[in-house]
Amino acid sequence: MRTRTRTRTLTAATALAVLFGSTALALTSAAPALADSSTVLPVTSTGAVVVDGVHQRVFISDPKSGKVVATDYSGTVVGTVESLPGVRGLELSADSGTLYAAVQDADAIVAIDTATATEAHRYPTGAGTQPEYPALAGGKLWFGYRNGGSANIGSLDLSGTDPVVTLHQDTDKTWSEAPILGSSTGAPNTVVAGAPGQSPAELAVFDVSSGSATRTAYVWDPGDSSNLTDLAVTPDGKDVVTASGAPYKQEVFKLSDLSGDGSYTTNPYPNAVDIAPNGAVAAGTFSWYDPDVHIFKPGVSTPVRQYDFPNTDGGSAADTLAASGLAWAPDASKLFAVSYNDSNVYSLRVLDNPAKADTTLTASAPSTAPRAQALSVTGKLTSDASFPPGTTVSVRRADDESPSGKLLGTATVGADGSYSFADTPPVGGRVTYTVGYAGDDYHASTTATSTVDVTKTTTALTLDDNGKVYSYNTQVKFTAHLGTTYKNRTVAIYADPYGGDKPDKLVKSGAVDSSGNLSVSLYLTRDTKLTAKFTGDTRYAPATVTSTVGARVRVSTALSGSYRTGTAWNQTYRYFHKSKAPVFDTTMTPYPNRKYRVEVQGYYQGAWRGTHSEYLVLGSDGQGTLELTGTPPTGVRFRIRSSYIDTTSGDNVNSTTYGTWKYFIFTS
């Protein structure tokens, strides 16, 4: 395949550079875009997020567009349920087979088949009811509904032959807006209700075991909170956690009497909460300049981990968490968060193992130690989340007799995270101690290693020719020399040519000769890193040495179109009529995306001075053609050459190679 021809106009400005100095060329390239860990969602709003662990799907309601979008755990859309105007609240059945969606502008509860992400049934709730927030409890689906200025709580009973809708279940009160409902398997006959967006807030608890809602607790202005956005009932059924615009914390209230039971301190402005089956609390905030998601151990007000969303559209503020935009995977391995930017682009963020705080483990042992004498391995286990008393780390030792490692025992971590373990290494050589922490529900596992050289002598190992540069395809002999050892006299030599398509390769392995030498001959077509390795024995330590050599490219050029040649100034010059465009052909060792540098110089005031320099793309066949057009000055001595410049020619596979100059003059 022939490379394309590049045409370069030798302009008047370029010609004048011969007389008034050289011109610098500025080359720029666009930096690659950084990938975002989130996936853009095809929604214009969000109402609720629910995770189906059986089918590993995430369901997001979109009230404005009137649909529910289903994605897999990576955020890829796998289905969409349309014709759901104003859909907001979502509730998943206990068997994960059905997703109930409250569709306020259709006055209906819609059952969605989670396996197929299709509408299965539609249950009308009554004209003008506008249901918004569903919750399963007591064998029924309960829902908060608007109904103009007479908002209340209703129920949908699907246990019989026909569905039965019962409205105005809260006989003690009429709500100003459809109340947010919550329930938990830990309190299977209890429903919690909260007034959304109201200042001050109000909460109520209902016993629904009889099929009707009986109020058992009520509070006005709980914890001086206002503008309730979300609530979640703890898995044990003892508390409800709320997310209100103020105060700046997710408050906790007992279901028994709605008295305060603690809080989870976050930042302005709380707008989401979800609780994992293991009790881990995910608290969300509408925060442009602070963390957006905060993870807590149950009952501990200091976060285990926090997430601060990036700015994805270049606006003045970072992306923010959508209201009620958090949902745990049932196994607590992932937390799904819906965010949006200033351009109202919504994204699904997948946070892996969010409840596990990062842990740091260190291990330190003497760098050298005598064989069969005691040494100590010490270190520290730290995390932002405290460790329970009695936490231990395991200690393993790997040596020449136990290369896979041997468990030595455990060390108890002190209150400050420190530990110490004593051992007597029985074998000489490199001994590696690996200290491990297994992790728990709220701490990530981690390991640390420390290596000790035990009573081993260092031997000499050399490899010649380091730093030398050779012409393309030159055969070069490399010799590794091994000094005194005990039993092992084997050396392996590896060659690693530059470029990702030619990996490190063993080129020779064997016993050294009586002089301690092992040699190998290679044809060099690329810069190459050679490595000689001695694996050691029971008395002598392993050794590794490297030698890096360069290989130039093969380059040739031709300048055509001249009407004659002649010898002048000790060079062969080609003469061109100024009306004839010279053609400069380059042949160079090819490599993917390789470029070659073309330089043009003019002779002025007793010296060659640069007039133009440019990198051109080399064809896949190693060919390149440049045509010089324009109106050049006559009688001026020019010269041109092509070169490969290490790294700036697009790769670092070869060493810098300058082509020979071609000399030319323009005449009338």
Image (cartoon, grey):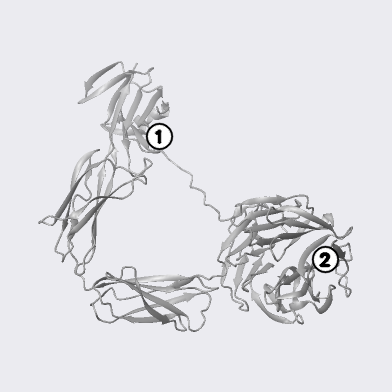
Residue at left offset 53%, top offset 71%:
357
Indicate left or right for 584 with 534 as reference.
right
In percent of width and height, residue 33 lies at 52, 49
The residue identified by callout 1 is: 617
Observer-nearest of 406 and 67: 406
Q: Is residue 644 visible?
A: yes
In percent of width and height, residue 512 lies at 15, 56
Q: Is residue 21 visible?
A: no
Observer-nearest of 484 and 463: 484
Mark 2–mark 1 distance (CA, rounded to whole Å): 72 Å
Mark nearest the camera among 2 and 1 is: 2
Which quadrant is home to the N terminus? top left
Indicate left or right for 335 with 148 as reference.
left
Amino acid type shown at disc 2: Asp
Amino acid type shown at disc 1: Val
Q: Quadrant of residue 135?
A: bottom right
In the picture, the disc for residue 157 is 2
